[in-house]
Amino acid sequence: MPPLLQTVMKMLIRTQLCFLALILVVSSTSFAQTSTRIKFRRGAVHAEVSGTLNSFKSKRTYLIKVRAGQSLKTEQIGATSRPVTIYIKDPNGNDVGDSDASCNNRREISPTEAGDYRIEVVECQKADPWSGRFTFRVTVR
């Protein structure tokens, strides 16, 4: 193979590799789910949190910092509530609370470990599909 052709082939391969790397970076950042930090007003022990879900595959993730020995409680609220399931992970990433496939829109963790708890809200898989807003209350005592 002539040296000029070898040089052109190497440039083509490098260009393709750079293009593939760029595609991987863009696709991984576009599908990344950001977490929303839950903060209480001064002196409050609970907060109401709202979000939107678009399908069975969509998920909203929230973070809340608690101290060791507290009680963390979540419950879906609202008169026209669409059924959601709320999952909670402790600061080590372990699922806490009941985790069956039911529409678990209430959770209570007591006592807590110190650190950030991750709250994930998804559509209940046992109910009819829907899209729209949901609201839940988080209480920490």
Image: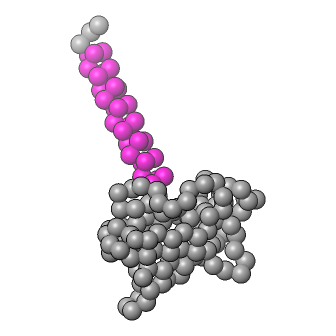
Q: Residue at x 56, y 56 (%)?
A: 99
In the image, is residue 96 above or below residue 42? above
- On the rendered structure, is 33 left or right of 16? right
Q: Residue at x 37, y 31 (%)?
A: 16
Q: Residue at x 46, y 69 (%)?
A: 109
Q: Residue at x 29, y 7 (%)?
A: 1
Towards the viewer: 16 or 45: 45
Q: Position of residue 87 (x, y in %)?
A: 53, 61
- Decide whether residue 48 is among the magenta residues: no
Q: How is the image coloured?
A: one colour
Towards the viewer: 65 or 61: 65
Towards the viewer: 76 or 82: 76
- Decide whether residue 9 is among the magenta residues: yes
Q: Which quadrant of the view contains residue 39?
A: bottom left
Q: Is residue 76 visible?
A: yes
Which contiguous range is marked in magenta?
4-32
